Amino acid sequence: MDQTLLQAYRESPWRTQLKWIGAGLAVLAVVALIAGIYLTVSAQATEVGYQITYLEKTREAQTLEIASLRAELASLTSASVMAQRARELGFQPADMSQALYIAVDPSLVRREAQLAPPASTKPEPLIKPAYKQSLWDWMVEEVLQWRIKGRGIKP
């Protein structure tokens, strides 16, 4: 009697196979989803890395250009070049015996404008620390925190 009762409620083999196939496909879908997220994050991190490299090269080229322009300005404003240009424009050296001195009120003196704050010595990081962590490390950290919270342990 017990044997016939068990057989009456036993599922057919094709239903069991469908359950296993469904479970396998669900696992495959979860793995594909995680792989897709990982690839997306990795692609974004790679793109940011290329942008950083490009910006560093641009900064280096601009630094060299600024140094070149400063050297050119220094040579154009040197005392010998300025004296030669003044002679060409018709200026003559001043005679100190004929110089006229005028007292100027200090409140009338124009102050130099400060257009931007001075450059900081410590640059800000280009990539946030949160973006330096791999997806795998993040998942392990989240699972560990979940387990710690589940046990009631306070960090």
Image (spheres, rainbow, N blue to C red):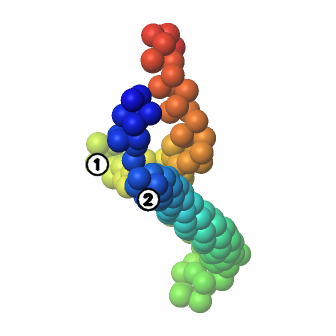
Query: In this picture, is 132 found above or below 21?
Result: above
Residue of label 1: 108
Q: CA distance from mark 1 to mark 2?
A: 98 Å
Amino acid carrying label 2: it is: Trp
6 or 59, which lies in front? 6
Q: On screen, 54 above or below 2? A: below
Residue at the (35%, 41%) spot, across then down:
8
Regarding mark 2 in the picture, which secondary structure is present there?
helix
| Dot 1 alpha-carbon crowd within 10 angstroms: few under 14, some 14 to 19, many 20 or more | few
* Whether residue 41 is visible: no
Residue situated in front as seen by the camera: 139 or 58: 139
Secondary structure state at the residue bearing disc 1: helix
Is there a contact, CB below 8 Å, between mark 1 and mark 2? no
Rendering quarter of residue 18: bottom left
Residue 27 pos. (x, y %): 49, 52
Residue 61 vertical placement versus 88 (above, below)? above
The quadrant where residue 85 appears: bottom right
Q: Which residue is mark 2?
A: 14
Q: Kindly identify the residue that appears in the image at 58 percent across and 81 percent down.
A: 86
Q: How far across and down, in percent of the image, does residue 152 sit?
A: 45, 10
